[in-house]
Image (cartoon, rainbow, N blue to C red):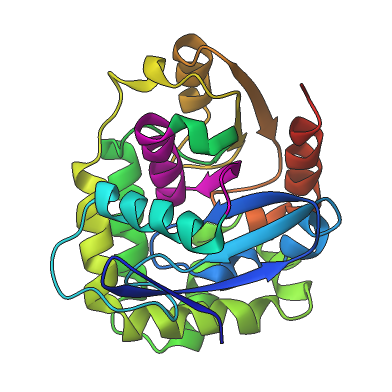
Amino acid sequence: MPYAEVNDTKIFYEIDGEGEPLLLFHGVRGSHRNWDFLRPHLRKHFQVIMPDSRGHGKSTELTEPSTIELYTTDMLAFLEHLEIPQCIVAGHSMGGFIAQQMALDAPKRLTKLILICTAPLVDVEGAMEQIKIGQLAFGLEPQEAVMKLLEFEFHDPEKIRNTPGMIDSLVFIAKEGQRLANSHGSAQGACAKFNIQDRVKEIQTPTLAICAKQDTTFPCRWNNFYKENLPKVITKVIDHSSHAIQLEQPEKLAHSMAGFAKTS
């Protein structure tokens, strides 16, 4: 299995497809498996690079509090390991925090920036949504938790139920969440401390900000914020999706990302 040993930790990753390199950052409690239904569409256009952030998936577990800066330092070292001088960087949710921090810390490493269902900080509304999810799933076995959360987390639960392999993938991610509960708690703490609202204007990288119309964790009003504050931004709203846009609307998401990559 491919691992990169960087910053005294092991980063697991997968690479799929050919073309311009696209580095994908997942959110809290996620891993490379979050992209299972998006990668078949992206691999037609990109060399898709999918690392597990420290404390997630198959990467080294976290044993102490973390920060978005630490994840970012890991990922910059990861790019060095892969000998990739520049690439498109995309992040979903917490992954968007890492992507924005990278654009601030190492702008020359990014050719383009894609922000997916994210923001420059977690506000009270977003925090409450995550607390609700945790409360609903508390004490439940992974299969039971997934089935209970379908109605709450997804815009179209029936579509999720009827997509082959989707429930199995969600159960796998839920099991990972239980195994890595302490590490994921550290990640949530890192997100709670993250706030670049006053620094967004410094990001000069051409950016695509995508929101899901029914997302209640990072509502589309954050796209309006980016439109007003990011110097080189294009915004996109994708309908019929909640926060997990890579699962609910993978084709539309991939189409938007590929189209943006082709812009000058």
95 drawn magenta? yes
Q: Left of 75 or right of it: where is 171? A: right
Task: Please tell me which residue lies in front, 155 or 205.
Answer: 205
Residue 172 visible from this viewpoint: yes
Residue shown at 29% from the left, 84% from the top: 139
The relative height of residue 171 versus residue 39 in the rendered view (above or below) is below
Vertical order, 207 against 30 (above or below): above
Examine the structure image and report whether residue 82 is included in the region drawn in magenta: no
Say left or right for 218 vs 240.
left
In the foreground, 77 or 246: 77
Q: Is residue 236 left or right of residue 65?
A: right
At horizontal 40% and vertical 35% (from top left) the residue drawn is 106
Left or right placement of residue 177 versus residue 61 in this view? right
Residue 156 in view in this figure: no
Residue 33, given in percent of the width and then of the height, sits at 58, 73
- Image quadrant for the C terminus? top right
The quadrant in which residue 27 appears is: bottom left
**Residue under the image location 30 percent in, 23 percent down:** 197
Magenta part of the protein: which range? 84-106
**Quarter residue 240 falls in:** top right
